[in-house]
Image: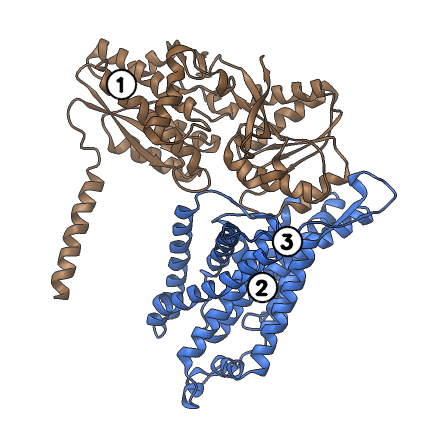
Amino acid sequence: MSSAKSLLLCALLGIGLCFGACGGGEEPGEFVLGVIFPLQGPNAQTGGEMLNSVKLAADEWNQSGKLGKWTCKVVALDDSGDSQQAASAAHDLCNSYPNLAAVVAHLNSGCFRATKKIYNDHRIAAMSPATTNPEITAGGFDNIFRVCATDDVQGGAAVQLFKELGLKKVALIHDRTPYGQPLTEVIEAGCKTAGIEVTELVGITVGDKDYKSVLTKVRAANPEAIYFGGMYDEGGLLVRQMRSLGMEQPFFGGDGLKGPAFTDAGGEASLGSRVSIIGPPIEEMGEGEASAYFEKYEKAFGMKVENFGPFAYDVANILLEAIARTIEQKGKPDRETVIAEAHKTDHNGVIGHTTFDEKGDTNNRVITFYEVYKNDAGALDFRPYKIIRP
Amino acid sequence: MDISTFLQHCINGLTLGGMYALVALGYTMVYGIIELINFAHGEIFMIGGFIGLMAIGIAASLGFTSPLLLLFAAFIVALPLTGLLGFTLEKLAYRPLRNTPRITALLAALGASIFLYSIMSRVYTDAQEFPTLIDGGFEFHLGGTENAAGLVVLRNVDLFVMIVSIVLMIGLQFLVQRTKLGKSMRAVAQDREAAMLMGIDVNRVISATFIIGSVLAAAGGILNGLTYETIKFDMGYKVGIKAFTAAVLGGIGNIQGAMLGGVILGLSEGLAPPILDAFGVPEALDYKDLVAFVILILTLIVLPTGLMGERVQEKV
């Protein structure tokens, strides 16, 4: 009895293993659009929205018939926002799918930094909706793209806002990640040129829950505002603990804070916080056809778009356009041609008009600051506060 | 560093220490009885917080609005339920492995930890807001400045955390030293087989230990929610490691040691980094984990049995 059971178990395991290992068995005429996002862990919510948006775009392309005889299959892997997992996911994707045509890559800068060489080794076009570390496109790889402006642009916008508000003394806190730290360093440099005193540039540890010792020190210098370069949870905890220590200063942050996860973590304390996001305000996004995205998303998934969904949707569309043009020329999604075609992108999408410079960075460099407020229903929400154009 | 900043750091450290102590007790009790480091204890702490939050939600939807009643609901529901979880965990995951090599049970504990963590990360994918049930506090202006720089804030919730921790620890001390159950716990800790021969139901005592440890962890989880006003599925990890450190620091297996270790660890985490910072050590504020573990290592080198641990005689 028990041996029969274990035999069955072995057989099942064997089948499972085979399925796992032969994962690359695509049908002829099917190419793979790879997706690597955090689908587990603290940023899973954001990653899920982006994945849904990519799927939405892929479905539309498959139904449109513009891909010729080919169909697009979306294969999603998880990086949990961790650079090591990102690298192993990228290896998996590149090695097990011979028909991989392009990759929609990563939410977190650290992840993309760890994987860009892997994509380049396999000559796969990789385009990110949301990684903002300036270094990512500085490596000279021609297959790395992103549709979001870098932290040089975002940091500059923060300094510009400080100037407009007449601030003289600010404290900068970052989360020591390849996203937060360079962002605040850009701001520090900008403040120096603008004559704004930086009382403190200090790092915190992601995953800690108690930041009171850092804040107590920041408080002692009495800055007029606090800027945090980091992600939702830490931002929420920081602003809460600031208020509980009697610090009434305005709180600013980058695109890592623009999302309901920040207001969930920060609660009432996050009221009035101002956070920037790359691109124009969602409310102004998408002229004509593109704006249909928000309705389509809500219809397909039963929830509202709140984060980087529009960026992921545009990335998927840009890549699929490049692939479609490649199929037209070569009859198949040839990787080198996809890279070359991606460079020629001229796309009017949800987040605006995207073209790439020679490094693969977008020429669309609008930054919007949002403010946390209480909407009519009494819930915490974001509303556009100021649009900063370069 | 001026005096107000120093006092603020002390207050920050003491609240942290109270929480560490509560969680450390669970580690130390279980280790004292069955020599198992229950790695899932941090997760039990986290789940206790979530059950408390659910209880508050249910009570609020039943129309209770008084913060005190809601707080009471959180404790009255979360403590027994989390105790039940600890009981179940021991019964399902640890008891079948009790007579296997120690490493097997240790791995089971790690597995249980990952299991509970993963489940909770599916149920609550996001940080959850914990209602502010204890509001207000005391503010002292030192140094005459009227801005936030000269301020010392002692929130009522910090006081509450300290008081509840102390009350629970006194209660535990009473239970272990003065009751029959406590006596049998001490007996099992000393020599399980002899205790069995003396007619003590060892299984029952071990179950009770897990229940008590989990109840304390649940209280810690609720206090954590009250302090930070937000809870998340990953909150057990860091606290778990720190509380374990506190337990070892105080001498693992020793109950007073765990309390002392928790308070020392919290205070040194609160005070040492700012002091280092005042001496010009770069990035010192980020050294609080470093401080905690350096203290641990130094204790282990100088006093291998911890601050209050007794040298256990080798059994022949």
In the picture as drawn, the residue positioned furthest to the bottom comes out as B198
Residue density around tag 1, few if under 14, some if 14–19, many if 20 or more, within 10 Å: some
In the picture as drawn, the residue positioned furthest to the right comes out as B144
Q: Secondary structure at mark 1?
A: helix
Q: Chain of mark 2?
A: B
Horizontal side of residue A79 vs A109, given as left or right: left
Instruction: Give above or below for A75 relative to A140.
Output: below
Q: What is chain B's hue in the picture? A: blue
**Where is residue B196, by image quadrant?**
bottom left
Where the C terminus of chain B falls, by quadrant?
Answer: bottom left
Q: Which residue is mark 2?
A: B22
Separation of residues labelled 1 and 3 (CA atoms): 56 Å
Whether marks 3 and 2 lie on the same chain: yes
Q: Which mark is residue A61?
A: 1
Q: Amino acid at mark 1?
A: Trp
Give whichever of B173, B96 is nearer the camera.
B173
In the picture as drawn, the residue positioned furthest to the front comes out as B63
Mark 2 touching mark 1, by CB under 8 A? no
- Residue B284 visible in rendering: no
Q: In the image, residue B285 lies at what x, y percent?
A: 67, 45
Separation of residues labelled 2 and 1 (CA atoms): 57 Å
Instruction: Give above or below for B127 relative to B49.
Output: above
Q: What is chain A's hue in the picture? A: brown
